[in-house]
Image (cartoon, helix red, strand yellow):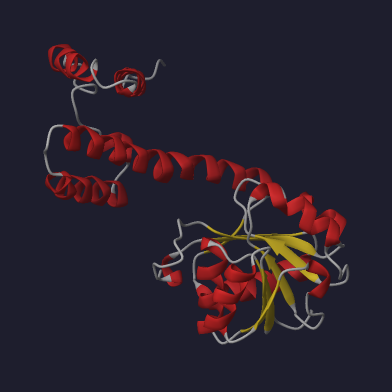
Amino acid sequence: MEKGIEKVVMIGAGNVGTRLALALKNCGLEIIQVYSRSLDSAGMLARKLDCDPATDLKDLKAHADLYIVAISDDAIPEVAERFPYPEKLLVHTSGSTSMDVLEDAGARHGVFYPLQTFSKEVEVDFSQIPVCIEAAHEEDMAILKQLASRLTSRVYLVSSEERLLLHVAAVFACNFTNHMYAIAEDILTRYNLDFEMLRPLIRETARKAMHESPAGVQTGPAVRKNEKVMKKHLEILSALGGYQKIYNFISESIIDKSKPEKS
C-alpha cells in the first residue's frame, strides 16, 4: 500500500476549501500550498495555514501526497487538463461531478466529498460530517479512507452515481429548505413581523427530522387536506408574487406523498 497522506495542496480557497484545509491541518497534516485564481483569496487562506499561495497551476508544488480540487464544478475539467503531475493523487470535492472528470489529470484520481454546507467564517465539527470517497484504484481508495478517518468516523465508499443521488437529496434537505426559510422571512418582514418567532418551530421541525422519518411526522394543512385553511393562505399569497405558485406546488406534493400506497 502507498504511504499515507501527510502533505496536501489545496486547489481552491472558497467555502469548502477553507473549512477542509483548516480541518486537515487540525488533524496534523501539512497544507503546503493554496491555489486560487485570486491572489487575495489564496493569500488569505495561505496565511491561516502558514503556507504559500499560488495563482498558476504550473506553479503547484511537486512534493505533496495529495492535491484536493475544491472549486466550482464547471472549473474542474480545466484543472484536470492543466494539472502538472500525472503521477500524483488528485481528488475533487464535488457532490454532483463524476470522478471521471479527473481522468485527463492522470491515473490516480478520486473524490473526497464532505456532505455538509460550509461557510468560510463558520467553524464546523468534522467529526460529525459524513465524508464520501471514491478512487480509480483500490490502493488510493485505502489511502483516502485512512485520511477521511482522521477527520470523522462517518466514512462512506460511494460511487459517482450514488453521490449524485446524495447531492440531489441534499439540495432538497438543505438548499430548498433554506429557501423556504427565506420566503417565510420575507413574508413576515413585509408585514412587520419578526422572523425570530419562527425559530423555535424551525428547531423542533429539525429535531423531529433528526430522530424520525420526516414523512411520518409531516404536519400542516396539506397533509390534513384542510382546504379552507389552504384557501385562506392562497388568498394572502396572491399579492406576494410567485409564492402562491410555490405554496400550491408543495402542498400538492405533500398531499400526493401522503396518499396510501396501492397494493
**Residue at 40% from the left image edge and 71% from the top image edge:** 125
Residue 78 x %, y %: 79, 53
Please tell me whether residue 103 is drawn above or below residue 38 in the rendered image.
above
**Residue at 40% from the left image edge and 15% from the top image edge:** 262
Residue 217 x %, y %: 24, 37
Relative side of 245 to 197, left or right: right
**Residue at 78% from the left image edge and 80% from the top image edge:** 61
**Residue at 31% from the left image edge and 23% from the top image edge:** 243
Image quadrant assignment for residue 167: top right
Residue 171 x %, y %: 47, 42
Identify which residue, 106 or 121, lies in the foreground: 121
Please tell me whether residue 3 is drawn above or below residue 173 in the rendered image.
below
Count of numbered badges drawn on the protein: 0
Relative side of 29 to 228, left or right: right
Please tell me whether residue 171 is drawn above or below residue 227 in the rendered image.
below
Residue 186 x %, y %: 25, 36
Please tell me whether residue 240 is drawn above or below residue 36 in the rendered image.
above
Relative side of 212 to 172, left or right: left
Q: Quadrant of the C terminus?
A: top left
Image quadrant assignment for residue 165: top right
Identify which residue, 150 or 88, lies in the foreground: 88
Q: Quadrant of the N terminus?
A: bottom right
